[in-house]
Amino acid sequence: MATDSLNERSPSPVLPIEFARMAFPSDKITVADLRRVHPQEFDTNGRNFFDGPKMGRAESDWPQEALSEMLSIERMIARLVFEPIRQGKPRASVLSSPWEDDVELIEALAGYYARYGVAHNPQETLRLIASIEEQAAQQAEDFTRTRRDATP
């Protein structure tokens, strides 16, 4: 039986950005923050933070969904900056983007940052997003420089 890999299916494989090297704003969230925002999930004798959503409960009230979306948005923003630079294109930014989808990413992240105490005002949220973009751009520039230096 034939097997295929990502490299065989994609003419230009997506090179991974090293998220582990990045300091994301959400890294500041502590268990105490989670308890403050979701006391009913921590301070109960029944279902807890690690259980799935409760019947009849809005998805936005499920802590794992909120945290997962916040982490995904941060990483998506990083990738949106990293990929164009890696491909030799001009640097992109969701902060100056005219696209409604990018504005929605910023608004969603601002809501999560406020909810979990990561940022206390819109200007702080914008600075935190800029820090994600800066780290991603630096990684992409380092990658392209390394690749350029390795080419004979």
Image (cartoon, grey):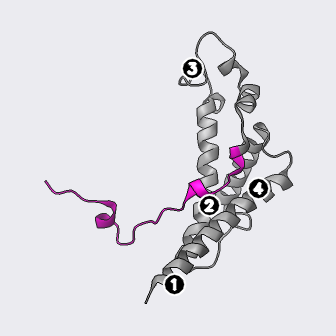
> Which numbered disc flags the more N-terminal residue, 3 or 2?
3
- Secondary structure under tag 4 reads helix
Give the number of the disc on residue 78: 2
Quickly name the residue at label 3.
54
Quickly name the residue at label 1.
149
Task: Give above or below for 72 relative to 143.
Answer: above
Determine the CA span between mark 2 and mark 4.
12 Å
Amino acid at pointer 2: Ala
Which residue lies most toward the bottom here?
152
Q: Main secondary structure of the magenta part?
A: loop
Which mark is in front, 2 or 1? 1
- Secondary structure under tag 2 reads helix
Which mark is in front, 4 or 3? 4
Q: Position of residue 21 (x, y in %)?
A: 60, 57
Q: Which residues are magenta?
A: 1-27
Please tell me how crowded label 4 is: few (under 14), some (14-19), or many (20+) other residues with Cα within 10 Å. Answer: many
Give the number of the disc on residue 128: 4
Determine the CA span between mark 3 and mark 1.
54 Å
Amino acid at pointer 1: Asp
Amino acid at pointer 4: Leu
The reply to whether dot 3 and dot 1 touch (C-beta < 8 Å) is no
Determine the CA span between mark 3 and mark 2.
33 Å
> Which numbered disc flags the more N-terminal residue, 3 or 1?
3
> Which numbered disc flags the more N-terminal residue, 2 or 1?
2
Amino acid at pointer 3: Lys
Residue at 59% x, 11% y: name it. 46
Q: Quadrant of residue 12?
A: bottom left
Residue at 81% x, 46% y: name it. 119
